[in-house]
Image (spheres, rainbow, N blue to C red):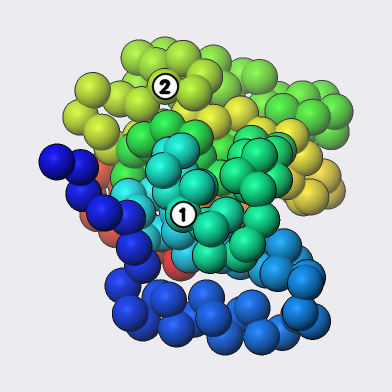
């Protein structure tokens, strides 16, 4: 028998509070913050039953949830590691060496883009513009940006993650 998907009472209360921000019939406006709550509560990623549950709560069609969840890189469509390394790969970051950073991470962790290390610790997720072009190359780890990256800085970040000393926000 499969497990029933439902928010914890405190999360459900938060969802209902978010929904009250929007007029009747405009529940879809609450989708982004509700997806963040769902991702956090249901293992760090959004599988189809979770997205269906969100659609039901918001009285919208499941496809409306899928479209949004798959569009934004902040939502994970499969299980991810404890640390998700989102490396910007757009113009300014590429010019400043993000491909070198990506190659280093791929080699050091022995994973490809979108993959997770065997120990479940790291996922590499190339990202489109993270909005820190003046500090390129950069990566996002949790809620924090790590800017002006070098190979040495990346190695330090990875070591701190392994030691459990990285705050994800």
Q: Is residue 77 left or right of residue 10?
A: right
- Name the quarter where the N terminus is drawn: top left
Number of numbered discs present? 2
Horizontal and vertical percent for residue 55? 57, 54
Q: Residue furthest left?
A: 1
Q: Which sits in the foreground, 6 or 40?
A: 6
Residue at figure coordinates x 36%, y 82% from the top left: 10
Looking at marks 1 and 2 on the same chain, the residue that comes earlier in the sequence is marked by 1
Residue 57 vertical position relative to residue 46 in the rendered view, above or below: below
- For the point 82% across and 45% down, the residue is 133
Q: Nearer the viewer, residue 80 or 109?
A: 80
- Indicate the quadrant where residue 21 lies: bottom right
Where residue 50 sits: x, y (%)? 43, 49
Find the distance from the CA under tag 1 to the CA under tag 2: 26 Å
- Label 2 CA crowd tier, 10 Å (few <14, some 14–19, many 20+): many
Q: Is residue 50 left or right of residue 58?
A: left
Q: Residues within 10 Å of mark 1 (few under 14, many from 20)?
A: some
Q: Residue at x 28, y 37 (%)?
A: 121
Q: Residue at 76%, 79% (x, y): give it.
A: 24
The residue pinned by badge 1 equals 53
In this rendering, does residue 15 appear at all? yes
Q: Secondary structure at mark 1?
A: helix
Query: Is 90 positioned to the left or the right of 85 in the image?
Result: right
* Disc number for residue 73: none
Where residue 7 appears, as percent x and y from the top left, is 36, 67
- Viewer-proximal residue among 49 and 106: 49
Q: Note whether residue 104 is visible.
A: no
Give the residue at mark 2: 115
Secondary structure, mark 2, is: loop
């Amino acid at each position: 028998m499969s497990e029933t998907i439902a928010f914890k009472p405190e999360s459900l209360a938060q969802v209902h509070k978010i929904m009250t921000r929007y007029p009747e019939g405009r529940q879809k406006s609450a989708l982004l913050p509700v997806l963040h709550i769902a991702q956090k509560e249901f293992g760090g990623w959004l599988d189809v039953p979770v997205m269906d549950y969100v659609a039901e709560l918001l009285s919208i069609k499941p496809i409306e949830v899928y479209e949004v969840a798959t569009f934004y890189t902040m939502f994970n469509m499969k299980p991810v590691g404890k640390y998700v390394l989102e490396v910007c790969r757009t113009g300014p970051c590429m010019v400043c060496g993000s491909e070198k950073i990506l190659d280093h991470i791929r080699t050091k962790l022995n994973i490809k883009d979108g993959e997770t290390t065997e120990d479940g610790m790291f996922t590499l997720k190339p990202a489109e513009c993270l909005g820190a072009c003046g500090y390129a190359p950069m990566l996002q780890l949790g809620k924090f940006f790590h800017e002006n990256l070098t190979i040495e800085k990346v190695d330090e970040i990875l070591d701190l993650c392994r030691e459990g000393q990285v705050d994800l926000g």
